[in-house]
Image (spheres, helix red, strand yellow):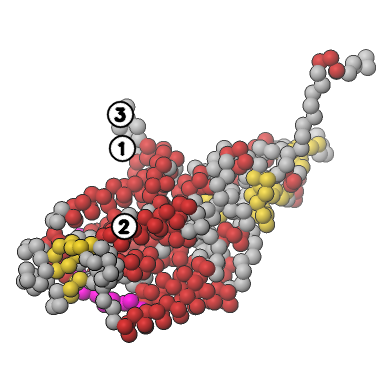
Amino acid sequence: MKNLKKLRQVAGFFVFIGFVALFSRFDTFGALAEVLTFFQLGPALVSLHLLAGFAGVAAVALLTLIAGRVYCSVFCPFGLLQDVFARIGRLFSRCQFKALPALMLLHYGLAFIVLGAVIAGFMLPLSLIEPFSLSGRVFTAVFQPVLSFVFRSDAFAGAGGINWFRQASIKPFSLPGTLMAVAAVLLFMVVCNKWGRVYCNSVCPVGAFLRLLARFSIFRLKINPTLCIGCGMCAKHCKAGCIDVADKHIDFSRCVACYNCVSVCNVSAINLQKSSVCEPQKVEFSAGRRAMGACMVGAAVGYLAPVVIFAKPKNTEVILPPGALNYQRFSSKCISCHLCVSACPSSIIRPMAISPMLVSLQQPVLDFSAGMCEQNCNLCSQICPVEAIVPVSKEDKRLLKIGEVVYRKHLCVVETNGSDCGACAEHCPTQAVKMVPYHSNLMIPEITPGICIGCGSCEHICPVRPEKAIIVRSVNEQTFVKMPEQKKLLNSGEQEEFPF
């Protein structure tokens, strides 16, 4: 029984390293995505209509019904990050944990506000407090740039060895996103050091769902009153603050399965014991009734607030990742986990800093200042855990129209300086931009918007500053372009004779 904590630490360590590798170098460790995201309850609950999402929810629910909230300490990336934050915080202050109030009404109320908002297609509340989304933004905005910079140094280049991280691209910083992630890191360092996992039992919507299931767990941590000497060591090390030393009771619905109490108990009074399935932890009728009322009010507020306060999101002047289809669909599904931001090899997928009425805050959009959308790349559509970006094959991606070219002749160097350029036409993969004769023996761009796929190569390469002479505008719906058929060459026997 004393080894439970060590097993949890070892398993959590490898899962954490997996997340670091995934967000730092997706193209090398992309296979981890299927395994790690399978156990992420937040994305799975959002994508219950998908087989993978349903299976993920079932697996986590079954694990919780058997052994409690093991997910919170082993599989939850933000739970693991909180352990890291607490360990760093304790280097400066060694506070002992204290028993915390149950905060059941607050927890269930917030969870159902989020649920109501998701049903209404308003994803901002979920993306702000859901653990997978939170951790994704921290990994992408803080860990990935730091790791890619560190591993590029020669000190980490093994002689004759392979350094996967050395090739990881340093993503351009999105200042608002980075500031939000850094602020979250600093806040949770203080919170985790002083109050432990208070977030898990007061704010986290996934924690609320698991909290409800854990009341019916078959195996639960219990205190043996005949062995307990009341020293209080278990409570001082309980990250969830769920141990009542006076009553010798553990509120197992709030226990996050860290097993600190088991490892520090010198008289082995705390053990994992089997309970009857029909014996849920007791909850006072009045408290349960209040919790039910909080859930109903929360769901109503979460659903009605975005419907009344926020109009349905209208299309904005942003280019969405290939496979997002349209702005309304994308904004109602994306949880802002930033897996696609981390995966993009061109670093053109960036979190939206400012969005209309906060509907799409921190959701990813394309920014062609850093590069272009590569035709042979479909990583973003392969990694999205909720299919806000639907899977698109590489072959189909080459003809997927994500934007449309706009040529601003009055800014072009051919018009303003009377000099040749042609960079936009040279880099256009579909010949939507081509050069045609102009005056003074010059060539000037001519566009055919119907065959433009909006890859951004023309906008990225255009040398005009600060405003580009050729840009890509958003489209209402991503569709597939139909390229004009090329004239077939006649067989050698059918070739027309020259008239001379």
Disc marking residue 159: 3
In the image, residue 141 lies at what x, y percent?
A: 42, 54
Quadrant holding the C terminus: top right
- Answer few, some or many: residues within 10 Å of disc 2's Cα (few below 14, many 20 plus, some between 14 and 19): some
Separation of marks 3 and 1 at Cα, in angstroms: 9 Å
In the image, residue 243 lies at what x, y percent?
A: 19, 72
Q: Which SS class for mark 1? A: helix
Side of 195 relative to 236 (left or right): right
Task: Kindly identify which residue carries mark 1.
Answer: 156
Q: Are marks 3 and 1 in contact (CB under 8 Å)?
A: no
Furthest residue toward right: 499
Q: Which residues are magenta?
A: 91-105
Task: Kindly identify which residue carries mark 2.
Answer: 63
Separation of marks 2 and 3 at Cα, in angstroms: 44 Å
Q: Which quadrant holds residue 477?
A: bottom right
- Answer few, some or many: residues within 10 Å of disc 1's Cα (few below 14, many 20 plus, some between 14 and 19): few
Q: Is residue 95 magenta?
A: yes
Mark closer to the chain start, 1 or 2: 2
The residue located at (37%, 37%) in the rendering is 164
**Which of label 2 and label 3 is nearer to you?**
2
Q: Which SS class for mark 2? A: helix
